Image (cartoon, helix red, strand yellow):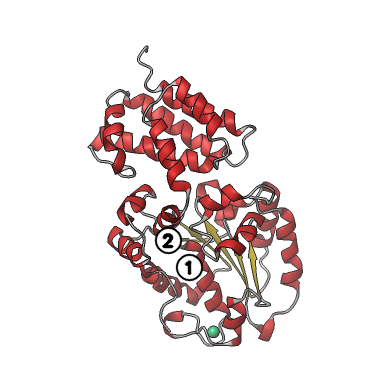
Amino acid sequence: MTSPLFPWQDDAWAQLQQLSERMPHAILFHGAEGIGKTLFAERFAQSLLCQSPASGGHPCGQCDSCGWFSQYSHPDYRRVRPELLDESEAAEGEEADAAEPKKAKSAKAPSKEIKIDQIRALADFMNISTHRQGMRVILLYPAEALNTAAANALLKTLEEPPPSTMFLLVSNSIDRLLPTILSRCRKFALAMPAPQQALAWLRDKGVDDADVWLAEQGGAPLAAQALAQSDVREVMDEFLRTLAHPGVETALKTADRMQKIPLNDLVSWTQRWLYDMFSLKLAERIRYYPRYQKEIGALAQRVEMSDLLGVLKSIKDRRAVAGHPLSAKLFIEDMLLDYASLFDTAR
Ligand SMILES: [Zn+2]
């Protein structure tokens, strides 16, 4: 059968196979959002359970195990992820890695966190014997969604791993994980694909203006595909136009109008916009928003480098609380006022 991976993942897969001689009991796959990490980890889970792996360690796709796996009914396999992803999957299929921005918007009640009950529920699963004395595989993603209680419960399990059990964790930002969890996992980095490969894949998927979306997602092809196909495009452009005209009044109006938009998206867009400004000042290059080169260039001339670095740093801190702000409107207001202060000519 053909490789079920994304075309940019073949090298990483081969590298992963080399672990099999001394297989750790927990692997943490990490890398940028929207490059297919979850699919990669799922394929690996499937290959661990497959009864007759094909050459290169790929799952055969034909045995009972592979059949159960593809229907998410394998008795020795569990997925642990926020409720939010379960809810949205029914509507969208399986590309959890890419489609998160869209998902966050449609959801209200379902949790964005992985909760302690979900980790406790694994205890029963780990106590029953496995099918044909094979392996037991637990895939958990995104690991940064573990809340504190859940992370501590998971840590206990990782400290005393049950026999023949493999934990596969996937994370978009390992700097948000507990160091104690990190130290219990073998870290496996998945790199951003080469631009040409990503572009070819996007064009093959019928994405128009593939280069624009790829640039705006920092080179992550699945994220670019999701963005190109979503209604987020329009909102994003509206937001970027407000960034092009910083000011107190714009900040207040935008906060009012955009309070229903996922804050993580707004933070990312602002962060990329600032990175572009930084990179234009420093190296006369633009990475994310080439369509706005003129606007970003004009703004870049009005800011001091040290101020810009300060706002970039505070944006990073904002990201940490964007998942659970007290008030979305105040959060946006504060972020945009901070941004507008960069251009405060009175100083
Ligand atoms: Zn198989």
Name of the residue lying farthest toward the left: 284
The image quadrant where one finds the N terminus is bottom left
Find residue 222 and report its horizontal and vertical position in percent: 43, 59
What residue lies at 73% left-to-right and 79% top-to-bottom?
A: 129
Q: Which mark is residue 213?
A: none
Q: How many residues crowd around disc 2 within 10 Å: few (fewer than 14), some, or many (20 or more)? A: some
Considering the image in quadrants, where does the C terminus appear? top left
Element at badge 2? Answer: loop
Rendering coords of residue 314 (x, y %): 47, 31
Q: Nearer the viewer, mark 1 or mark 2?
A: 1
Q: Quadrant of residue 158?
A: bottom right
Q: Is residue 237 above or below residue 228?
A: above
Q: Write the residue at 38% across / 24% down.
A: 307
Asked whether 295 or 129 is in front, the reply is 295
State which quadrant residue 189 falls in.
Answer: bottom left
Type of the residue with mark 2: Leu
Residue occupying image coordinates x 28% and y 61%:
196
- Is any atom of residue 179 visible in this view? no
Q: Is residue 105 visible?
A: yes
Q: Which residue is mark 1?
A: 40
- Quarter holding residue 165: bottom right
Mark 2 C-beta to ligand 1 under 8 Å:
no
Distance (Cα) linking label 1 and label 2: 9 Å
207 w.r.t. 165: above or below? above
**Extreme-top residue of the structure:** 346
Report helix, strand or loop for mark 1.
helix
Classed neighbour count for the residue bearing mark 1: other residues with Cα under 10 Å, few (<14), some (14–19), many (≥20): many
Query: Residue 304 in the image: x percent, y percent?
Result: 32, 23
Residue 28 x %, y %: 53, 61
Residue located beneath label 2 in the image: 190
Q: Are marks 1 and 2 in contact (CB under 8 Å)?
A: yes
Which sits earlier in the primary sequence, circle 1 or circle 2?
A: 1
